[in-house]
Image (cartoon, rainbow, N blue to C red):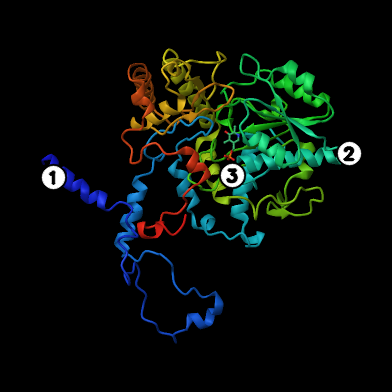
Amino acid sequence: MSNKDIKKATHHVNQNEGLIFERSSPGKKGYRLAPLDVPEVDYAKALGSSARADLGNMPEVSEMEIIRHFTRLSTWNYAIDLGMYPLGSCTMKYNARVNEYVARFPGLANAHPYQPAEVSQGAMRVMKTLSDCLLDITGMDAITLQPAAGAHGEMTGILLMHAYLQSRGNPRKKILIPDSAHGTNPATAAICGYAVENLKSNSRGMVDVSALAAQMNEDVAGLMLTNPNTLGIFEQEIHKIAEILHQKGGLLYMDGANMNALVGKTRPGDFGVDVMHLNLHKTFSTPHGGGGPGSGPVACKKILEPFLPKPVIVEKADGTLAFDYDRPKSVGRVRMFYGNFGMHVRALAYTLANGPDGLRQTTEDAVLNANYIRKKLEGDYTLPYQSPSMHEVVFSDSIQEQKGVKTGDIAKRLIDYGFHPYTVSFPLVVHGAIMIEPTESESLEELDLLVDAMKSIAREAEEDPEFVRNAPHTTRVKRLDETAAARKPILRWKPASAKSAGD
Ligand SMILES: *Cc1c(COP(=O)(O)O)cnc(C)c1O
């Protein structure tokens, strides 16, 4: 094939891109209905003023055209099923197919939330068994599966703390949050009506225990702490931290988003945590990203149990399960029905498929993978903290910055190498953070490819910084205007003819 032929061929492909509106022609349909065998209804009359006079600019296309359109769009996406997501803090692990298989069992997939408990025993048993497993894993006493995501779990947990402190006479005013925290932590504290007080980290990237002792008083409801923290470092003085809080009547909230580093090895309930959330869509391998549903169960100690959202599942003497709504101290519902049940099924499938030994192995492999990357890239990128890494490693771009290449540029160049970018500029305590979390899912071969790509980019930044600054070079679209994308997002594609008409 000559270059010209190739151009012609790709022209055909390109002609097909995103043109579903332009392909539209009046009267084309992507469906066919059986002939009418009942009297025809005049919709305009039946619906009155609710009837729409015209469908606006909806494309009219054939079934095959619409299928090609969406199939083509799906190939433009990056996905965990295509390659690695080294996206630190997000635990983008493989979503095991056994989870999907189980989630499609008709009795579970078709269960209706309004079904009475007598005919929902299987679904309720799934929730009860998952609850018991998560309590075992976290070392806590009681749990709710209602929250829909991590941030939602944080809110639920802080509401529990508030209700408990209120029941003792004073909900208090402040919540302490380390400077390395995930942005959702201060947002949660604020939305629950607390003032946020910043807590400094020490030179090892951990909570400065003497600063905590100085800041802790009877106005402080508690501390929100991620462990291992967002630098991927385990808070070695967690016992002491819990003690300082408890001595002054405060509570320790643990953001459990990083439990992938702890499952099967140590339990927050054993190191002084009073309440915590889990991200089933991180640690427990349910799908994550792309706007799908998440799940953020909240586990707590006995003292907080009366305040849990209702209903809670209880086991009756005859072994059947029931929903208990008689919870006078409950903070109420935080989510309709019982939370994102499909995620509970997947998380339980993952947990049971692995078993205790498998889960422990998962944790060890996740930590091993992160440390492999740390060791391999140590010379090429700056390591701002020397403390041991757990499940993720955070570098800084300070070597590359001398050539004007920043973490965002390196991340964009990584796309050219076929990887999803790592987490850029987070946590904020690291200047130009490069945050990598490989998870246990990736093989040695895949890790080596990532290491090679990162090393190669470090070389490029040295020899041809301009080239890295202009990356990506191989993608469908070049660098986007990130400010405009955030401030003036175009959420709907419109045909060229309709573009002048508005947004
Ligand atoms: C992901 C994450 C959250 C928020 O969880 P969502 O499910 O995205 O709401 C909170 N804290 C940390 C440390 C996280 O990594």
Residue under the image location 54 percent in, 48 percent down: 293
Front of the two marks 1 and 2: 1
Q: Which of the 4 quarters of the picture holds residue 461?
A: top left
The 10 Å Cα crowd at callout 3, few under 14, some 14 to 19, many 20 or more, is many
Q: For marks 1 and 3, give the CA distance.
A: 51 Å
User: Which SS class for mark 3?
Assistant: loop
Q: On the picture, is 30 further left or further right than 263?
A: left
Residue under the image location 65 percent in, 16 percent down: 202
Q: Please give the residue where the numbered disc 1 appears in the rendered image.
A: 5
Which numbered marker is on residue 169?
A: 2
User: Which SS class for mark 1?
Assistant: helix
Which numbered marker is on residue 346?
A: none
**Amino acid type, mark 1:** Asp
Front of the two marks 1 and 3: 1
- Count of numbered marks: 3
- Quarter occupied by the N terminus: top left
Q: On the picture, is 263 further left or further right than 326?
A: left
Q: Please give the residue where the numbered disc 3 appears in the rendered image.
A: 295
Q: For marks 1 and 2, give the CA distance.
A: 80 Å
The answer to whether residue 99 is visible is yes
Q: Furthest-front residue in view? A: 500
Q: Earlier in the sequence, mark 1 or mark 2?
A: 1
**Amino acid type, mark 3:** Ser
